[in-house]
Image (tube, rainbow, N blue to C red):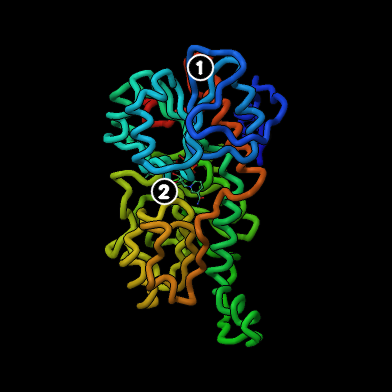
Amino acid sequence: MSASRVSARLSLLESAISPRSHSDQIPSSIVKSSNMIASQSALLIGGITHARPEWEALSSILTLKEFPSGTRQEFIENCKAGHYDDVVAIYRSNTSNKFTGNFDAELLSILPKSIRYICHNGAGYDNIDVPAYTRRNIAVSSTPVAVNNATADVGIFLMIGALRQAYVPITAIREGKWQGQTTTGHDPQGKVLGILGMGGIGREMATRAKAFGMKIQYHNRSRLPADLEAGATYVSFDELLANSDVLSLNLALNASTRHIIGAPEFGKMKDGVVVVNTARGALIDEDALVTALDSGKVRSAGLDVYEEEPKVHPGLLSNPRVMLLPHIGTNTFETQKEMEILVLNNLKSAVEKGELITQVPEQKK
Ligand SMILES: NC(=O)c1ccc[n+]([C@@H]2O[C@H](COP(=O)([O-])OP(=O)(O)OC[C@H]3O[C@@H](n4cnc5c(N)ncnc54)[C@H](O)[C@@H]3O)[C@@H](O)[C@H]2O)c1
């Protein structure tokens, strides 16, 4: 990692939050109050695993409330009953989305008028209707940068696994079949990696892939400055499809990127292309991917994300040329902790300075 990126990463983590003594007590389902009564509250939806002391330290400036688990209906009832009427900032996550459902326009209409900030734990935030929250003047932050290394590591793991079609030997040896039906794989050396979405994770994919002797090309909405390009070639979307041996998806899911890769795009790719997706499942039309795998157009794929998680397309499950992981991109101790701290730093900055550190780019425009 370059010195500038290290310092950018550290500056996100520098915090005025000073951990206080850790309490293992699970708070009540609605309210965990501080010793002092602050006039404003923060609401934690779901759990905090690694940074609970830092969360509890916020009780010096805020009353802390929690909705650790439950249903969307229960959450809505709490809102309607006025339990969160003094909440100015919410800590939520992709994980806690299963309790509340999406932060969509319906939920927004029920949230207390006091809420000014949504501090989201996750680099992807497609479960928040950002335009609707922007219209209500609610600022939203996510956790970029902190996720880069762990997610790119998984991307490389999936790419190598797909190139080597590693699923077959991995399962054969445990079934007592030694190599079983293992086929001969392919080297990354000398191949062209095409990165669609050259943001934080895409650039870390590029850094790692260069060490494997790959040539890097990318497509982004706009070309990057030379220092961020770091030797990668900027190409059009169609050139990326036509000239990549491995295509890695590293862009956000939104209305304009849903199914950005479908049957017409597979048709423009090289025969035997390898597809890696650690971004969001719905970027790819999964039915079209299964068809392209079945025909051999796509030789193999490495996937961490799916269109309808936790459902996985049966055509992917049954295909031994596909490496499948259950959305574990950021699931390391170090990264999870860094993400939690970054959310809390956003929350503290919001309350104390009126600004988020990593506000989502759509709102910064
Ligand atoms: N598998 C996981 O656990 C995991 C972990 C973290 C992030 N993610 C996903 O990865 C995505 C990328 O994360 P990031 O932190 O690198 O985001 P980022 O915002 O740093 O980078 C995304 C890049 O995509 C580009 N882009 C957007 N729309 C595009 C388009 N139509 N065509 C080409 N490029 C486009 C943007 O300009 C940006 O450079 C996230 O949105 C998230 O959904 C998944």
CA distance for labels 2 and 1: 38 Å
Pick the front one: 147 or 7: 147
Name the N-terminal-most of marks 2 and 1. 2
Check the picture and name the quadrant holding the C terminus. Answer: top left
Ligand 1 has an atom within 8 Å of the beta carbon of the residue at disc 2: yes
Residue type, numbered disc 1? Val
Which numbered disc, 2 or 1, marks the residue closer to the eye?
Answer: 1
Q: How crowded is the residue under tag 1: few (<14 C-alpha within 10 Å), some, or many (20+)?
A: many
The number of numbered badges drawn on the structure is 2
Identify which residue is drawn at 27% across, 35% down: 106
Task: Mark yes or no: residue 290 visible.
Answer: yes
Identify which residue is drawn at 56% across, 86% down: 181
Q: Which mark is residue 351?
A: 1
Identify which residue is drawn at 50% across, 17% down: 351
Q: Is residue 192 above or below residue 91?
A: below
Under circle 2, the secondary element is strand
Pick the front one: 214 or 112: 112
Under circle 1, the secondary element is helix
Pick the front one: 85 or 225: 85
Q: Is residue 27 above or below residue 113?
A: below
x then y, percent, for residue 47: 55, 39
Q: Is residue 168 above or below residue 285?
A: below
x then y, percent, for residue 136: 30, 23
x then y, percent, for residue 244: 45, 61
Split into quadrants, the picture shows ligand 1 in the one at top left
- Name the side, left or right, on which 110 lies relative to 323: left
Q: Which mark is residue 168?
A: none
Identify which residue is drawn at 34% across, 33% down: 77
Q: How crowded is the residue under tag 2: few (<14 C-alpha within 10 Å), some, or many (20+)?
A: many
Residue 214 quadrant:
bottom right
Residue type, numbered disc 2? His
Disc 2 target residue = 219
